[in-house]
Structure formats: structure tokens, C-alpha cells
Image (spheres, rainbow, N blue to C red):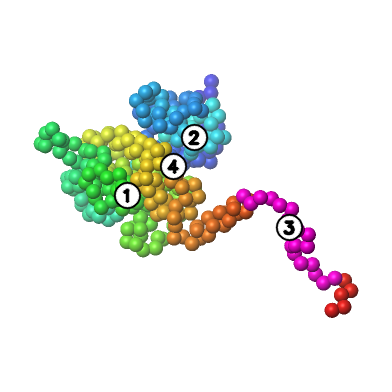
Amino acid sequence: MNTQADSVQDTSADELAFIVSAGKKFVVTKMLWLPAGKEDEIWGTEEQEDFNILDRFGEEDQPANKTQGALRDIYAVVPEDYRDAKDFNDWIPAAFLHGMSDQRSFTVNRLRSHPDLFDCTTKQLSSQEGRREFRKLIGYRPTKKNPDKFYYDSTNVPILHKDYAEKYDPAKFFLHENLFITHAAITRGPATAAAMKSGHPPPKVQSVTHLWGLRRTELGMVAAAAVWLRYVYSVDDTFGPTGTVSGIEWQEDFEYYLQLLTEGLQKKKPSILNVFRVWDQKFYPSSEDGLAGVVDSDDECAVGKRAALEEMNAEDSEPEGDGGSEGEGDSEGEGEGDDS
């Protein structure tokens, strides 16, 4: 009988490394966690072709719809060649989940080991007590019914708003500068994030942006950055679906942010479209398939590329003719025997 261990032995090191890397990319671009309790079951789920992406966040047919949404996200990073029923239910899940776990641990260590990126000292970020002073930044608020009781809000969060707005403002949400610093540190490295923060030119370094071929801002990038940034300042020492000290439901908040972004894009909400335009302009100015459309860019090379494509498309749209009337076109050279 062929076991999973046998399948792994029959799999090349390159294939294993590719799927582990796909799991890492998934955490950065799509989802921090797979749906709770469905980490194993999802791999045997059949894709529903008529699935409405907004049903992913509804109350009906759950957790089936969440599973369908997550399956589509997996397909976005795992090529079709790897979706053979045997492999997809055999060695791939373990390798993929291993990559996800590694990326979460790596990201936690990277972000918290660079307190200067988040306007903190090492002493402040290295202990629960030090991080406790940042509670209000990440949504710590008194309840309306009992001001002596506190909770962590998901949207009335200053550190997720441009200008530290304390009350949810859709025009400022997902636009705090430290969100950009977080994404830069994860996808391009701490040195690039530090350069962005100081306004200096970024260093030329290899990063997962190039390794994974990141070309545009994805829904999961923004939602994950919001969770990572709040976690950096939180009293939690370990990163999991639920904060062991803060009690913050990190996985629920991620899903909520993903819902805000998904529904906003589907309904073409100006505030959400602006989020993706701003993010693309900062990180992917050459993107031709941004979720909010092509961004305005000061990158002359990117502008030139778009202009050339637009000009070519304009030519393609012109009615076809016979090439002009007789006698038009390229001039002929001097005729043979011309005496002039």
C-alpha cells in the first residue's frame, strides 16, 4: 500500500521546495490561515464553477462557502499541473501547510526584531509590558455599556488609519504609513522598509517580490498587513488564530478585513478602489492588471509602456482598408537608365 511517506520519497526535492514556497506565498498574498477545521478536508473539495465569491463571507452554507473561497486562493498559487487528485490529496497538503507555518513564524520574527520600523525601542517591543502602552493604537477601547470594561475593536483602530484616526473612516482605513512599512519588510526586506521610511532610495537586493513574481496588490496582502501590524504592537507573544494574552481573534479579523476589501472591490466602492491604487502606486507602479485598474504613476518607463500598448490597441481598432489609393505608399527608387 502506497503511503504518504512513500509519495514524499518519490517526489523530487525541487517539487517539494516549490510547494513549500507556494505555501509561503499563500500566507503573504492570500490567507494567513486556512478555514478552521478544514485544513485537511479542503484538499479533497471539488471546485464549484458557479461559486459567487461574495458567498464566501455570508452566513449561509458555511463552512462550505469559506472552503470554496480558500480553495480558489490555493489554486491561485498552485499550478494546475500539481492538482492531480492523487498528489493534491497526498504529499502536497503537508508541504503546503509546512510552508504556511514557516512563513508565519518568519514574519513574526522579522517584524518584531526591527522595532525602529515601527517607531519603537527594542525594550518596548521585547516584552508584554512594553507593548502594553500601544493598546489604544491597535483598537483597545471601553465598551459602550460599561466604560470600565475594555475590548479590542477591529475597525476603530488608529494604527490602520492614515493620520491615526481613532474612529473608522473608510477614506483613511488601510492607509497608515506603517502598513506600507509592514508590507515592504515582508516582501522586500527590512533594509528596503527602512529606506522607504526614511525617504532614501531602496537598496538593490533580491527579495520574494522577484522570487514569487509579485506584480500587483492582492486582497490578502492588505488584510494580512493589517493583522501583522496590529500584532507587532500587541501583548501576544505567539501568533495564532486567537491571541493567547490579548484575546484578539486574529483569524476572524483577517477574514473581516478580507471581506471589506472583497465587497468593496465588487461594489466598486471609491474608498476601497483608492486603497488598491495607493498600494499599487507604492509597490507595483508598472502593474497592468491592478485590482482597481491601472494606476497613475510617475515612473516614466511604466508610463511609456502603457502609452505604447494604448497606441497599439488604437491601431488595432482602426477599420481595415486596402492600403491606400494607387500611387500612395513608399516612394520608389530611381528607375533603371534614369539620365538625371
Amino acid type, callout 3: Gly
Quadrant in the rendering for residue 330: bottom right
Distance from the alpha carbon under mark 3 to that under mark 1: 54 Å
The answer to whether 275 is drawn above or below residue 253 in the figure is below
Instruction: Name the residue tied to disc 4.
Output: 25
Q: Earlier in the sequence, mark 3 or mark 1?
A: 1
Q: Position of residue 11 (x, y in %)?
A: 54, 34
Distance from the alpha carbon under mark 3 to that under mark 2: 50 Å
Q: Position of residue 68 (x, y in %)?
A: 44, 28
Instruction: Name the residue tied to disc 3.
Output: 324
How many neighbours does mark 1 have within 10 angstroms: few (below 14), some (14-19), or many (20 or more)?
many
Q: Position of residue 224 (x, y in %)?
A: 35, 42
How many neighbours does mark 4 have within 10 angstroms: few (below 14), some (14-19), or many (20 or more)?
many
Q: Are marks 3 and 1 in contact (CB under 8 Å)?
A: no
Of 307 and 119, nearer the camera is 307
Instruction: Name the residue tied to disc 1.
Output: 175
Segment tinted magenta in the rendering = 317-335
How many neighbours does mark 2 have within 10 angstroms: few (below 14), some (14-19), or many (20 or more)?
some
Q: Earlier in the sequence, mark 1 or mark 4?
A: 4
Q: Is residue 319 magenta?
A: yes
Instruction: Name the residue tied to disc 2.
Output: 75
Is 222 placed left or right of 16 in the picture? left
Q: Is residue 117 magenta?
A: no
Residue occupying the far top of the picture: 1
Which mark is in front, 3 or 1?
Answer: 3
Of 230 and 116, nearer the camera is 230
Q: Earlier in the sequence, mark 4 or mark 3?
A: 4
